[in-house]
Image (tube, rainbow, N blue to C red):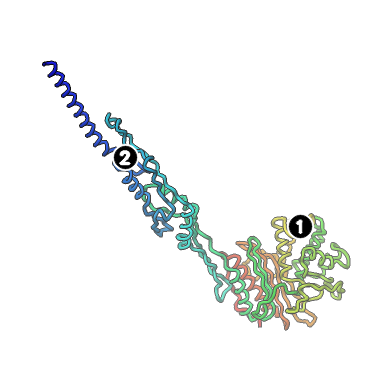
Amino acid sequence: MKQTQLRTLLRAAALILILAAALISALQFSRYKKVVGVFANGSTWGGVDVSGLDRSEAAARVQAAYDRPVELRYQGEAIQVNADELGAQIIIPAAEHLPVGPSFWMYLWSRPETAAEIPPELEIDKDVLRAYLVEMVAARYDLIPPAPLPLAGSTRFEIGQPGRALDVDASIERIVTQLRSLESKPVELVVSELPPAAPDLQNLGIFLKQKLSEAGFDGIAEISLVDLKGERALHFATRGGQDLEEDIAFSAASTVKIPILVSLLRRSAEPLPAEIDSLIVRMMALSENPPADQLMQQVIGGELAPLSVTEDMARLGLENTFLAGYFYLGAPLLRLYETPANQRQDVSTSPDIYNQTTAGDMTALLQAVYQCAKENRGLLVDTFPGEMTQSKCEYLLGVMAQNKIGVLFEAGVPDGTVVAHKHGWTEESDGYLHSISDVGVIYGHETDYLLIVFLYDSDQLLFDPANKLIAQLSQVAYNYFNPSHQINWLFGAVDYR
């Protein structure tokens, strides 16, 4: 009896223990279910605290943290933009890849939970970001420097103002860094300052034509300008305010002494004999004609030396430049030249049959001399290899710079400016002056430039007003190429008639 009661009591106790264990397990599992779907204390996702949050709650918190407005600043101007507009998108992993909650066994044994640290998965489409910066920021806030306009009643141009431009690449890196950061602070965009713009070439042409018109010059004018250190160039011809096709045939007069000197130098060894150097200085700096004849006879050689000069120019591709005889009075015409320029039917300056050139030919020749002198390259070096050297070209420009007459180009530039030029004018058979020219390289404060001016008046070219007009044109050109060193016109109105 006692044994039976004891077994019964034991069975009851075991049952109670089983029931108790089941109850405890049920209670523990119920509690476990509450924590199995949440992140442990101290868990972070992309730097965002997600402690105690389930997957969806954590994802929402992370999404909100990264998908926030970003403030961009363009030199103090604030621009509010959503992260997604900048190409940023937070990537939420699939649920099974999120380390949420402990295992039930670990929970039962009260083992400490391991805090999760999930790195951010932020994708940034830089093409979208770049497009936003270009189309929405740069297009609105960049300031392209406007071209300074000519100042009416002067020879000057407006003082150019600097501009600004967004540095897109540098700004992208700053924005990406901020998008990946949870710290909320403005992004200072990288903005570069743009230098003032140069006056517009078209405005320069209008300004020069305006000066011709204001002076009352109704003859033929052809002008060429070249920035010798850049790419700016202008060339036009006009008569009485009406545009003409360029490359009109003009009497070369003493400007043809530049081709003579080129032909002479290519045939000469260095150093030049003192006697030859002295004759060159007289020909170029003093513009004397007898030394030119003497140099052609002695160095270039013989009675046909002028034709050799012409042949040299033809080899350079200058088909409108020729010298058909010596300078001395009564010199025979060695050949009658027909050129594309002097065969034109639309315009004529009645050019001298002994020597002619065009603004285009003089531009090409002086550009070649400058390139040869500065860089030992270009048309002269290529056409006459070993004969036209850098030192010879430097000499040529140097002797042209000795031509100091105080008028024409020189009168329009600041004192001390080096002007390597050759002027030309001559009385025609009727005893009047009809054409005047000045061609040369001007060494400005900001750049070196080439200026070519030819004027022609079929009635009579008056030297004093023509000289003043060319000086004014020279000053306009100087102020254009040297906008930070402009000078004022101090010689009053130019009245050609």
Dot 1 or dot 2: first in sequence order is 2
Q: Which residue is mark 2?
A: 39
- Pick the residue in front: 496 or 44: 44
Q: Amino acid at mark 2?
A: Phe
Residue 47 lies, in percent from the top left, at: 36, 43
Residue 197 lies, in percent from the top left, at: 55, 64
Q: Is residue 442 left or right of residue 425?
A: left
Q: Residues within 10 Å of mark 1 (few under 14, many from 20)?
A: some
Residue 291 lies, in percent from the top left, at: 81, 67
Q: Is residue 129 left or right of residue 311?
A: left
As helix, strand or loop, the secondary structure at mark 2 comes to loop
Q: Amino acid at mark 1?
A: Asp
Q: Which mark identifies residue 382?
A: 1
As helix, strand or loop, the secondary structure at mark 1 comes to helix
Q: Residues within 10 Å of mark 2 (few under 14, many from 20)?
A: many
Mark 1 to mark 2 CA distance (whole Å): 80 Å
- Pick the residue in front: 342 or 359: 342
Above or below: residue 103 compared with residue 375: above
Q: Residue at x 69, y 80 (%)?
A: 219
| Quadrant in the picture for residue 150 | bottom right
- Pick the residue in front: 335 or 245: 245
Q: For the C terminus, which image quadrant? A: bottom right
Q: Is residue 135 left or right of residue 92?
A: right
- Count every numbered label the image shows and give the total: 2
Furthest residue toward left:
1
Q: Residue at x 35, y 38 (%)?
A: 99
Which one is closest to the eye, mark 1 or mark 2? 2
| Quadrant in the picture for residue 303 | bottom right
Residue 338 lies, in percent from the top left, at: 81, 73
Above or below: residue 480 compared with residue 371: below
Q: Is residue 13 left or right of residue 214?
A: left
Furthest residue toward right:
302
